[in-house]
Image: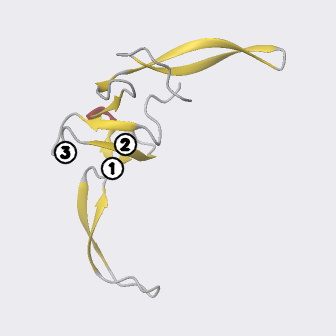
Amino acid sequence: MAAKIKSGDLVQVICGKDRGKQGKVLKVLSDDRLIVEGIQIVKKHVRATREGQEPGIVPVEAPIHRSNVMFVDPETKKPTRVGIVVKQEARNGQVKNVRIRVAKKSGKELEA
């Protein structure tokens, strides 16, 4: 099944301490979690390394569950659900079914 939220999408947090904030998805993890830029910031204690990294407390983005975010519609700039539409496309003389993501509020097709 096609993924509803992919890396590079703009999402908005709908619950939790960062509710209402928007950010770009940096990485999609395998267990239904996302790493979103500027969201779910935690402080990580790091140790000095031989490569010259200084020790201290560093803020990093922690994973957030995908049920706590919604896709932001590119036209209305508001959170929306994402649907999947199956279209037939001709490639090299063969007809294949292609799944395309669609924003529910505006009905606009999202880039693949």
Asked if the residue at tag 2 contacts the one at tag 1, i.e. Cβ–Cβ closer than 8 Å, the answer is yes
Q: Nearer the viewer, residue 35 or 102?
A: 102
Looking at the image, residue 109 sits to the left or right of residue 95; the answer is left
Q: Residues within 10 Å of mark 2 (few under 14, many from 20)?
A: some
Q: List x then y, in percent, for residue 112.
A: 56, 30
Q: Which residue is mark 1?
A: 63
Number of numbered callouts drawn:
3
Q: CA distance from mark 1 to mark 2?
A: 6 Å
Decide: is 99 above or below 71: above
Which of the two discs, 3 and 2, labels the residue nearer the N terminus? 3
**Label 3: which residue?**
18
Residue most extreme to the right = 93
- The answer for how far apart the CA atoms under marks 3 and 1 are is 13 Å
Element assignment for label 3: loop
Q: In the picture provided, is 77 more to the left or to the right than 98?
A: left
**Badge 2 amino acid:** Arg
SS for dot 1: loop
User: Of the residues shown, which amino acid type is indicated by label 3?
Assistant: Asp
Name the mark nearer the viewer: 3 or 1: 3
Q: Which residue is at a point 38% across and 44% down the rendered structure image?
A: 24
